Amino acid sequence: MIKIGLEKIKADQLSTKLNVLLSDYQLFYQNLRGFHWNLKGRDFFELHLKFEELYNDAQIKIDEIAERILTLEGVPLHSFAAYLNTSEIKAANNVSNGKKGIEITLENFQQILLLEREVMELASDAGDEGTLTLISDYISQTEKTVWMLSSFLG
Ligand SMILES: [Fe+2]
């Protein structure tokens, strides 16, 4: 049993899954920075700011996920090499079209949501209320963002 009273084997399984989520978020974060930087066209001022808002939000979640892994007595991945090995999200290169950037963002969010629901199942099985609350909030926030980005695309 770990210090916060969860079964060690279940806490380890959660840490492993949360490290995939952490890696996904790191690749997603860097995708968003690329969209923010390379953007061209009439939507520049609007989307430059929107991508910044999204990567700032991703950065907060990256830290929270890593610290949840530590709370579960796991070790958060922290090298670029480890993130590339573990992430299910692919790097997006040289995207300067805002609409394309939003489409990739929506695809990345879908991958993240599917993984977060897997985390929810594991956390539920482990009786891990802390992880459930954290990830449950992420899911509802992300789902709302998906709606707004989809509305932007029309
Ligand atoms: Fe900037």
Image (spheres, helix red, strand yellow):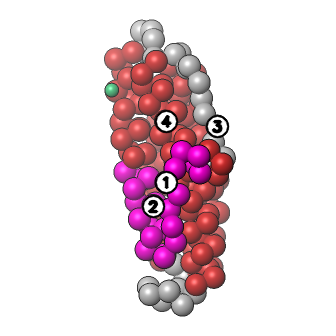
Q: Are marks 1 and 3 in contact (CB under 8 Å)?
A: no
The residue range painted magenta reads: 60-83
Mark 4: secondary structure: helix
Seen from this angle, which residue lies furthest top?
Answer: 41
- Quickly name the residue at label 2: 66
Considering only order in the chain, which callout, 3 or 2, is on the residue closer to the N terminus?
2
Horizontally, residue 59 falls left or right of residue 85, namely left
Other residues around mark 1 within 10 Å, as few (<14) / some (14–19) / many (≥20): few
- Please name the amino acid that badge 1 sits on: His
Considering only order in the chain, which callout, 2 or 1, is on the residue closer to the N terminus?
2
- Quickly name the residue at label 1: 78
Q: Quadrant of the C terminus?
A: top right
Q: Quadrant of residue 127?
A: bottom right
User: Residue drawn at (50%, 86%), measured in percent from left and top?
Assistant: 2
Q: Quadrant of the N terminus?
A: bottom right
User: Residue drawn at (56%, 19%), measured in percent from left and top?
Assistant: 94
Considering only order in the chain, which callout, 3 or 1, is on the residue closer to the N terminus?
1
Other residues around mark 2 within 10 Å, as few (<14) / some (14–19) / many (≥20): many
- Quickly name the residue at label 4: 30
- Please name the amino acid that badge 2 sits on: Ala
CA gap, disc 3 to disc 4? 10 Å
Q: Which mark is residue 114?
A: none
Name above or below for residue 148 compared with residue 20: above
CA gap, disc 1 to disc 3? 17 Å
User: Residue drawn at (41%, 38%), measured in percent from left and top?
Assistant: 54
Q: Where is residue 114 in the image (x, y as percent from the top left)?
A: 64, 53
Q: Nearer the viewer, mark 1 or mark 3?
A: 1
- Please name the amino acid that badge 4 sits on: Gln
CA gap, disc 2 to disc 3? 20 Å
